[in-house]
Image (spheres, coloured by chain):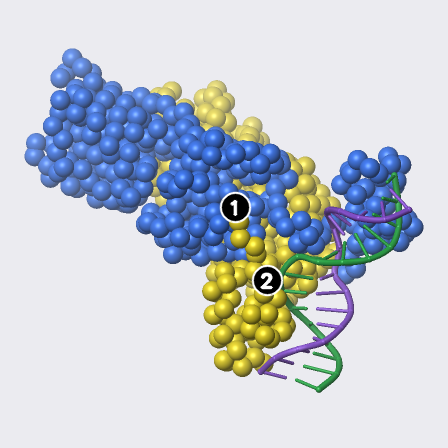
Chain colours: A yellow, B blue, C purple, D green
Amino acid sequence: MQKEITIYDIAAKLNISAATVSRGLKDHPRVSKATKKLIVKTADEMGYRSNSFASNLRKKQSNVIGVIVPRLNSNFMADVLAGIEKVVNNNNYNLFISQSLETMKKEASNAKAMLNNRVDGLLVSVAYDTTSFDHFEPFIKRNIPVIFFDRVFDHAMCPQIYIDNYKAAFDITNHLIKQGCKKIVHIGGNQLRNVYSERFQGYKKALEENHIEFDNSLVIINDLTSEAGAEAAGEILKMDPLPDGLFVANDICAVGCMQALKKEGINIPDDIAVAGFNNDPTATVIEPPLTTVNYKGHEMGEAAAKLMINYLLDKQDLQQTHGLILRSELIIRESSLRDKSKQ
Amino acid sequence: MQKEITIYDIAAKLNISAATVSRGLKDHPRVSKATKKLIVKTADEMGYRSNSFASNLRKKQSNVIGVIVPRLNSNFMADVLAGIEKVVNNNNYNLFISQSLETMKKEASNAKAMLNNRVDGLLVSVAYDTTSFDHFEPFIKRNIPVIFFDRVFDHAMCPQIYIDNYKAAFDITNHLIKQGCKKIVHIGGNQLRNVYSERFQGYKKALEENHIEFDNSLVIINDLTSEAGAEAAGEILKMDPLPDGLFVANDICAVGCMQALKKEGINIPDDIAVAGFNNDPTATVIEPPLTTVNYKGHEMGEAAAKLMINYLLDKQDLQQTHGLILRSELIIRESSLRDKSKQ
DNA sequence: CTGTTAGCGCTTTCAG
DNA sequence: CTGAAAGCGCTAACAG
């Protein structure tokens, strides 16, 4: 196990000062080309690697960005993380990643760890049950930027990046209505979270605009898993008369529900037209393919990371971009396409 | 922006030494219960947070584990990462995560960043085109453990965690043969990677044991994406006579291929029986559901992280667990189940 | 353009 | 059980 080389070792060998080595290594303007080159060369030869702790300790910044997400293993989040990683890595920052597993408790403990590790900034998509901002307060106090994405939290100091869930849900519900649906069930998630409450509100608004009375007994709130979708199918089948439309707040749940409905002999879209949200890979595999809302996680991750990096580098004012709304698009597939002549 | 509190501030307030505060904060045995309690209390009141840089600098260890994977946004990898995160987080370590995007070049640059950031250990699943160990050599020199998982690299000092791809592929091919398949196509990935070469070898072995002559023109090597699967379907359809079995090295590609085959009127499983690998979520959504090999990424991630943590904590000898082979299981679904009376 | 110096905040001997 | 003191490796004034 070789001894670690420090700038002092390099300095000694070259008969110059450690300060010059430090400067030479980071391309400081006031070091002669020649010595700079020499320094880099010998550093390389000696197998030097900079000690980021010492540097961070001195500079009081870590070059690390922390990320807290509900879960790592969702298709959407993985996409987001890939986008974040790309941007962060290209800017010579590092990524601390942790998952809250959908509980505020773990989210808070993760935030604390991030704080202790002196992350330069924090990117967060909040857990299912997060109701308080307390665990982020220490960041604000210390002027460490906190940016929310997708599942956002309202706070004056924290920019948010998301899509227009309200409009997307409005459009998709409207589409179902235009296809002739008159009794549309909505399966949604925890209404604490913007993404789910806005999708619900968009659904309601579309009904209203089309003069369809909102009926709360057509709304099912669950955790949007595939299993929950199958269960919801049971409830739907008990409704009398049967609904003719279904808007689910995510594709995973929509697919689970469709499979269960199909098993019971329901024809999609003729008996019930179905739409989901997210454009999950399964949406194109299920039969019939699922109408959904496409919004790219990769893009959202990149946008969030870029905003963070720009702030960190240029100290660009975060307030200016308080809300960044990304584009989403309605993708119409067969699961909601009815032959209107049959109506 | 408040000033950061240090142990000196606490010490001053309590009229004790910083050394005692340091000890008290980490539950050192030789500090009286009373002062310990007092220290923790005032630290809390003053809003103290430990500076991990200073601590790391002094202790020469970071409490950070690095992870390099080909991509973050694959269902399997996301699962693995979730498993790793859980174990690492529970042990008060932090996670640096980066992706090689399937190139050795980026893998090497990521490894270097990990090295500079003094990770205590490195978990790696190698890129598509990794042929050299050079970028990991500095870790070995410094006695920093490197553990490979899933896509492993052979090196005396590096434990490996994987499943028995050879046997799984053998079993699945054997199953196809038992279903009456006589002409079985194999779609595989880069043969540089153990996971794909072993699946290929298992396939060959099963043919051999069943006295079916291996035919290289039935082997298609691609990048195992869904699109590649669709393309492969084109090649398959040109074969004359048509094959009656298909074993694909992952589900994503298998599903893409199935969709294309179905579009051309091929009946699965009666015309061609199909099997995949991974038990991807889409495997149960495609129709007919896909026969595949199940192996849980979460479990693999946990196993890899546990091995790492155990080594780091107990300095348990890594050599002892050079190869950790996890369980996988064949899941037979309709895509490969033939009505034998028809044969 | 280069050197001197001090200090970031913590841990850990060693001494009491 | 507690304190004094040194030092981890680097950077940034400041001074030449």
Choose between B26 and A90: the one closer to the eye.
B26
Task: Return the x and y of residue A245 as percentages of the image width and height.
Answer: 43, 33
| Viewport quadrant of the C terminus of chain A | top left
Residue B270, compared with residue A20, is above or below; it is: above
10 Å crowding of disc 2: few (<14), some (14-19), many (20+): some
Asked if residue B236 shows in the view, the reply is yes
Confirm or deny contact between disc 1 and disc 2 (CB under 8 A).
no
Q: Tell me which residue sits at (56%, 46%) in the image.
A: B120
Q: Which residue is mark 1?
A: B143
Task: Return the x and y of residue A13 as percentages of the image width and height.
Answer: 56, 70
Residue A61, compared with residue A217, is above or below; it is: below
In the rendered picture of this protein, how many numbered marks are placed on residues? 2
Tell me the chain of label 1. Answer: B
Query: Judging from the image, what secondary structure is the residue with disc 1 in?
Result: loop
10 Å crowding of disc 1: few (<14), some (14-19), many (20+): some
Residue B175, compared with residue A28, is above or below; it is: above
Q: Is label 1 on the same chain as label 2?
A: no
Task: Return the x and y of residue A187 as percentages of the image width and height.
Answer: 51, 33
Q: Which residue is mark 2?
A: A6
- Marks 1/2: CA–CA distance: 18 Å
Query: Judging from the image, what secondary structure is the residue with disc 2 in?
Result: loop
Choose between A35 and B111: the one closer to the eye.
A35
Q: Tell me which residue sits at (59%, 59%) in the image.
A: A51
User: Residue B143 vs residue A115: left or right?
Assistant: left
Task: Return the x and y of residue A246 as percentages of the image width and height.
Answer: 45, 33
